Amino acid sequence: MTPAVPSPAIGALRDARSIVVVTGAGVSAESGIPTFRDKADPDALWAKHDPMDLATAEAFMRDPALVTRWYEWRLCRCTACRPNPGHVALARLEALVTRAGGAFTLLTQNVDGLHQEAGSRNVHELHGSIRVWRCLSCATEHPMPDPPFREHPLHCPRCGKGILRPGVVWFGEMLPESALVAADRALTNCDLFLSVGTSAVVYPAAAFAHGARAHGATVIEINRDPTPLTKLADLSLMGKAGEILPALVGEAFDEG
Ligand code: OAD
């Protein structure tokens, strides 16, 4: 059944000239990719693992084989999954808005590459990508072949000396400068901000809604559960991103 979307949200989408969307693991959950802290997700990663054992540079240096195997397993999940209707609706929204001369920026905390696979173009990966790995010695970036890997850790096929690390941002590391610059620019100019499928607890992404609001944007949250952002948002649409986003974009732009 198509969910009912409130008319102020439809109006905000229709009137927007510059949209910024921030996404998190919830947008990929319906594709079958585990979230990090969703209490309803039996596979939620940080319920089963301590991020300090797997998602820090120190953890990788301590046990590169273990960390490589864990990211290989996650990469496996990502390559086996396909974009869901939520990803597709965001790609469609971008096409509609940019065709009409508007601006659209997608800032994702996800490392799975599913937005790009769905056709989104102006995507900035705040937490990097699991599909690109980097040599610790010569810094060459390598697109990853499909698992299983031939060794753990992987050695750089270019220099042969260094080992490869996943191209994701770990705890304690800086976010990519280019993504932060793009986020800053887009947030300053946007008139509509959508937060989709994120628990809104990890910074700096958790602060973006506040920045957009300070510049006068309407803030809409689409999430299955309440978050710290829910009270600040102008509108909160509770439910699955894969159902709400297609309904919202359809109501705003489809004839009849
Ligand atoms: P979380 O796992 O923290 O939050 C996922 C959110 O999505 C929760 O609020 C869920 O209620 C919601 N959710 C689940 N399924 C949904 C659905 N089908 N539709 C809509 N909402 C749904 O994931 P993130 O907020 O992305 O960082 O986590 C942020 C960062 O914390 C990650 O990028 C990762 C993690 O530590 C690093 O690894 C650096």
Image (cartoon, rainbow, N blue to C red):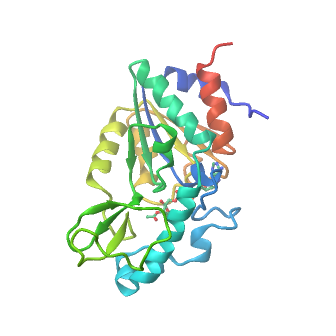
* Vertical relation: 203 (above or below) 171: above
Residue 234 appears in the figure: no
Q: Residue furthest bottom?
A: 62
> Measured from the top left, where is residue 249 in percent x and y?
59, 28
Q: Residue furthest right?
A: 1
> Measured from the top left, where is residue 24 in percent x and y?
52, 52
Q: Nearer the viewer, residue 231 or 249?
A: 249
Q: In this image, 120 relative to 158: left or right?
A: right
Which corner quadrant of the figure contains ligand 1?
bottom right
- Determine the image quadrant of residue 36: bottom right
- The residue positioned 22% from the left and 74% from the top of the image is 137
* Vertical relation: 74 (above or below) 82: below
- Determine the image quadrant of residue 176: bottom left
Q: Quadrant of the N terminus?
A: top right
- Determine the image quadrant of residue 150: bottom left
Label tally: 0
- The residue positioned 37% from the left and 35% from the top of the image is 215
- The residue positioned 49% from the left and 55% from the top of the image is 112
> Measured from the top left, where is residue 160 in percent x and y?
24, 76
Residue 116 appears in the figure: yes
> Measured from the top left, where is residue 10 in percent x and y?
61, 25
Q: In this image, 14 relative to 159: left or right?
A: right
Q: Quadrant of the C terminus?
A: top right
Q: In this image, 132 relative to 97: left or right?
A: left
